[in-house]
Image: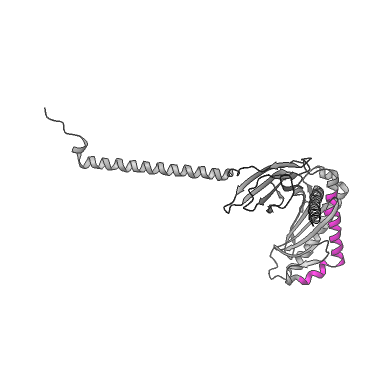
Amino acid sequence: MECQRRWRWFSSAWILILGVFALKEIQAVHHRHVGQFTAVGTIHSLLEINGISFMDDVELGSYNYAQRKINIKIPWISEALGVDYITQRRHLLVDHEQHFRWVIQYLAKNGTDHNRNHTGQLLADCEIDNDIKIKSHIHLIWDGEEYYRIDEEDGQWENLKPEVKKYQHILESPFWTDLRKRYMNEYCVGLMRKIVGYKNLKDNVPPEVTVSRHVNPEGSTILSCTTTGFYPHSILLRWEKNGKLGVWGKETSSGILPNTDNTFYLQVTLELPPEDPGMGYTCVVEHSELKIPAVYPVPEKPTMEKPWALALGIVLTVILLLSCAGAFIAWKKRKSGSSSQLERSFPSLASPTTPPH
């Protein structure tokens, strides 16, 4: 029996370790490409169309409707894609103008005001891991409301507005199906592969790591591990206790979020049960720029209050002191005023009479 328990523990630990390293390998080569197209028009004419493309939250380029030109945001991407590819993409976008014009006119004809501006949007995203496509989706949005979406792996359009279900047969027609598959394969996944195979979008940056400990009002200890300023966005954070993996409490994550400088942010917190004082814990961070996993111990004492809380306390203290000083000055003035009034009413009290000689 004891042997079986040990074997189960060993198997669970080994699976957990394999999972951690497998996740690291998967994340290290993960990339995501998002394309968004927006058209504005009436039943009579197409007024505007624009497109913008992002990869790993970095803007790649945009489409200028007036000039029918693709504007590349990062110069070397033109070299990575090649002139022929960019020309082919521009022709496709010009064709899209006709498609959007037809869609707007087709959907707008059911409206009562034929001069009203309508907005049609197509949002497409795809992801690759280790050069293999793992996800891709398309969302169709009309006047701010999502009408249809499709998961390319499933291949079936999902209708989100029952009143427009009658249009689904158009999306499932051979023409639109072929156009959708061509776009996702050549211009969503294909573009991403060309860029990844040529160069990194920006210089790699290791994460800045902060580890803290706080005690909540209920008495539980909360550990926080915050990483920020890193690129690429693939990163792995885990908690260890005395150098061992395990499930120690309730763990929550902010998810990987973009910073304004195109780097990324991630915070993972661990809420321990009241009986666990939180000793011996470390946050282990793995990122391509760290070369080896970095270990950050949790402080033994609760972390000082955040700077904004300290600053707020100082401001409140200053306000209190100023209020007290103001009250004191007002009291002095009232006292001085009372003394002056007394002197005017009883001058004999203000200046003693000089005795006669």
Q: Position of residue 51 (x, y in %)?
A: 76, 54
Specify the quadrant of the image occupied by residue 307.
top right
Q: Which residues are magenta?
A: 165-193
Q: Quadrant of the N terminus?
A: bottom right
Q: Is residue 336 left or right of residue 322?
A: left
Q: Residue at x 42, y 44 (%)?
A: 323
Q: Quadrant of the C terminus?
A: top left
Which residue extends farthest top?
Answer: 357
- Using the image as rendered, state which of residue 195 and residue 324 is in the foreground: 324
Q: Is residue 307 magenta?
A: no
Q: Residue at horizontal 78%, vertical 72%?
A: 166
Instruction: Give the image location of residue 53, x and y in percent.
Output: 77, 52
Return the x and y of residue 127 as percentages of the image width and height: 81, 54
Which color scheme did the rendering employ for the protein? one colour
Question: Up-down: is 75 above or below 67?
Answer: above
Q: Nearer the viewer, residue 103 or 116?
A: 103
Residue 107 horizontal/vertical position (percent): 75, 68
Residue at 84%, 53% in the rendered image: 189
Overall secondary structure of the magenta stretch?
helix
Does the image show residue 138?
yes
123 or 285, nearer to the observer: 285
Given residues 154 and 282, the one toward you in this image is: 282
